[in-house]
Amino acid sequence: MQNHFPVWKNVLVLTVLLIGFIYSLPNLYGNDPSVQVASSTSTPLEQRQADSVAANIKDAGFTPKSFEFSNGKVLARFSNTDEQLKVADLLKAKMSNNATVALSLAPATPGWLRALGAEPMHLGLDLRGGVHFLLEVDMDAAIKQDEERYVNDIRSAFRDAKIRYQSVSKEANGIKISLPDNNETKAAAIEVLNKDFRQLDIDEKTDSELLATIPEKQLKELKKSALGQNITTLRNRINETGVAEPIIQQQGEDRIVVQLPGVQDTTSTKDLLGTTATLEYRLVDTEHDVQSAVEGHVPVGSRIYPDKNGRPVLLKRAVIVTGDQITDASSGLDQEGTPAVFITLDNVGAKKMGKMTQDNIGKPMAVVFIEYKSQTKVVDGQKVQHKEKVEKVISVATIRDSFSKRFQTTGLDNVQEARTLALLLRAGALAAPVEIVEERTIGPSLGQENINQGILSIEVGFFLVVAFMLIYYRGFGLIANFALFFNLLALTAILSMLQATLTLPGMAGIVLTLGMAVDANVLINERIREELRNGHSPQASIYIGYEKAFATIFDSNTTTLLVALVLYGFGTGPVKGFAVVLALGIITSMFTAITGTRMLVNWIYGGDRQVERLSL
């Protein structure tokens, strides 16, 4: 009974084989060109809206392969991309402002497989096509914004403490605070700064001048926070558009990689990624003359802003609420039929807005639209990127009644501007402007060519190994080939269950795994041959071959696994993908090459059979 194989091991191998077969199946069905319709607000679509989408498609003469409505989203599948594109254009024109229409590739997995949770692997940018952006975050702008915030906060703190000051302004080396030449005033100012702004370093430059600077440690935290917030904001913006499986990740200290599989419209995508737009609500200064301010006599506590037509408007410097206090925003039309954005504030913003509107009924309030634009200028024959902060008043309205948490903003030029602004406000403002420093577009035809070449490489590698094992090891080679197929099945199933994104390096990992998977069987078969030459019986040779080869197989695979872990730990992007596939392939090949083949060998040669010779 040397080759007795426990029943539980048979059950384990067969169970893994069945699971591998089921969960790798979805990858054979491909994808359907689809159109996805989702709500652009926090409220999901309702059944009546889904019925309206279905009616619009039917009235236009299109028949989807299937029409699905679940989790507040509509998914219409089509037979070809021509129908997909035409229906997408149709729905964009027909749907309301609060709906987002997006192109997608929906897996054509049968319903019974989806019921078991079986889904295909995602395809990466190099296989599916799409766009790749490398964004650089303007850290200097992030620091400048933080310093400007400190300027406003210090002014407010001095006013609350009734401390007289001549000016608080941002300088190249910090925040300059000019005070009257009075020791008591200076002492009071330092006390307020040390109490409310402990994070700043305060230096006494002269008897009437202080300099507040942000410490180096806090600057590093600020840059880290700005990068993290930008990644979150970009992810929110992309999610709003319905793009499937986007990759948004940090690269280095100030760069962000954005990969959007399936996206071909780079113009609108660039506008979405690079736009830093937000709103500020300020009271209009009605106590002073605008013309006098334009001539240079700007009152303390006020500032001139242009409106959309370029005319000057005098506003209070104190900001009521800003864009980062907006929790939700949706676009639509107001009672007069003009484009509007309906806004919801957080509790802090609602409290401030409620108090301000209650105290200023009958006074005008302005909405300031703030945007950072990147322009290319030629300086000394060289193209230089120049970032410009654009601020304009888009609306001035009289406060008729008190409001706080929910209200609307009008004054927008068209419905598309209202829709874009609502999307940006929902996703949040970028903590600092970003600049696209690298852009690549991969067409779907090239992606399909990569898929075909990748599959061809797997097929060629698989059949070459199969042919070699059959010719050289005969029956035991056939068993090893079964284990090889079992290994490919198990690896595909695991990647599908993990919903991994398959890329070209991942395909390379699969090909390498196929080549390495038979190494264990080569060692086992050669050890069995050696035992036969030493005069052992076939049964004893099988037993000794598996027992003695295991240590060598384990050691060699462990060292390769360690290399894969190192690649994953220190690599980025494609290298990580290759390392994951390689590591999983090592684990599956260990199981299939040792346990899987041992089960088959036991079925053929095990038990009480009297074996005269082996097909080896």
Image (tube, grey):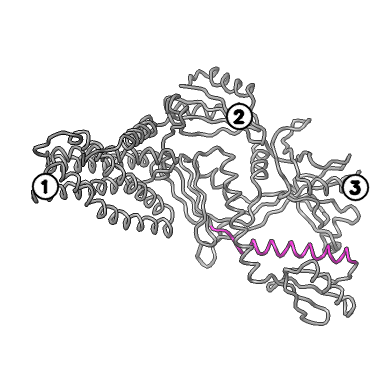
Magenta includes 139?
yes
Circle 1 residues within 10 Å: few <14, some 14–19, many ≥20? some
Residue 63: percent from the left, percent from the top?
48, 19
Residue extending furthest toward the bottom: 206
Front of the two marks 2 and 1: 1
Kind of residue at disc 1: His
Provide the major secondary structure of the magenta segment. Answer: helix
Q: In the rendering, at what x and y percent does residue 556 appear?
A: 28, 56
Q: Amino acid at mark 2?
A: Gly
**Which residues, given as a range, are shown in magenta?**
136-161
The secondary element bearing badge 2 is classed as loop
Q: Is residue 355 magenta?
A: no
What is the count of numbered marks? Answer: 3
Q: Amino acid at mark 3?
A: Asn
Say if 256 sits above or below 364 in the image: below
Pick whichever, 31 or 579, lies toward us.
579
Residue 360 - label: 3
Give the residue at mark 2: 72
Residue at 52 percent across and 68 percent down: it is 380
**Dot placed on the residue nearer the N-terminal end, 2 or 1:** 2
On-image quarter of the N terminus: top left
**Where's residue 196, x and y in %?**
80, 66
| Residue drawn at (52%, 56%) of the image | 250
Residue that numbered label 1 is attached to:
536
Whichever of callouts 3 and 2 sits on the residue coming sooner in the sequence is 2
Q: Is residue 449 above or below residue 566?
A: above
